Amino acid sequence: MRQILITGGTGQVGTELAAIDWPEDVTPLFPGRDELNLADPASIRAYVGEREIAAVINPAAYTAVDKAETESSSAFSINAVGPAALADATRERGIPLIHVSTDYVFDGSKNAAYEVDDPICPINVYGASKAAGELAVRTGNPRHVILRTAWVFSPHGGNFVKTMLRLSDRSELRVVNDQKGCPTSAADIAATLATIALRQLDDPDAPCGTYHFVNDGPTTWFNFASEIFRQHHQHGAAVPVVHPIETSEYPTPARRPTNSVLSTARLQDDYGIKPRHWREALADTLARLRETNSAGSHG
């Protein structure tokens, strides 16, 4: 029986990893924070050292982008110190570490999709902490895969899709239209992480390095919101009128990259993973939310 340690089990991606139909000879471990604290390297060493673990998937992160501007120590503890300790522990045991990172390591100034080898230049504390985590993993364990993703949504936790649905009873909404990216399903990220982890388990020579995974199709937050409401309205819901605005009209403590579009070419080449379009992934997520709400209303 091969055990895969998975951090962040209550997060969007962690929740989807728990729903994966893993092979019979693979057991995923989802320790709680009382068992494994990413901000405590000693906790990480103890947990990994006391178990026969075949691989580690690390989607856990401090993701409060705006709060990170004033909580940099917390952001760096979880997003950089934790991954460094995981890299040390996995390297010592010769096992692969699959680490989730973010589009926010880029400054957003490029006029095309970011490739994995483009220079990073984070413009906020969260991005800087994730860039530091990447460096720790990259230098700490040669058997690593860093998977950058962006604009994550799911039926779980807090995300843009759920926020828009919560605000759908308003008559009008204003949404930023000058930031580009690729909305990405947490379920699709989880499936990609599982594919990579199983390949790493079965093949010691499986490709390592940095990759991007996002759902296909660049868009803006405004167009993403418009599509959420279009699909929501198809099922009889009343929806607001959405107005495009510029980032300058919606100031936030942390700056956001203007362009967060990521190229998935290397992942397709090395792992054969071809992302589906985000609209299709969104339709699945909205259907799951309707099922949950329907079950709740009858419960």
Image (cartoon, rainbow, N blue to C red):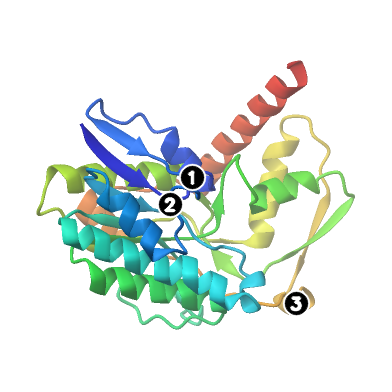
| Residue carrying label 3 | 251
* Residue 249 screen position, x and y as percent: 79, 76
Callout 2 crowding tier (Cα within 10 Å): few <14, some 14–19, many ≥20: many
Seen from the viewer's position, the closer of residues 258 and 126 is: 126
Give the CA separation, mark 2 to mark 3. Answer: 36 Å
Question: Splitting the image into 4 quarters, where does residue 298 fall?
Answer: top right
Query: Where 16 falls versus 208 (above or below)?
Result: above
* Side (left or right) of 205 relative to 285: left
Front: mark 2 or 3: 2
> What residue would you read off at disc 2?
36
Left or right: 208 in relation to 67: left
Residue 122 at least partly seen: yes
The CA span between labels 3 and 1 is 35 Å
Image position, residue 276 (x, y; %): 42, 45
Q: Which amino acid does label 2 sit on?
A: Leu
Badge 1 crowding class, 10 Å Cα cut-off, few under 14, some 14 to 19, many 20 or more, is few
Task: Find the residue positioned furthest to the right.
Answer: 171
Q: Do the residues labelled 2 and 1 touch (CB within 8 Å)?
A: yes
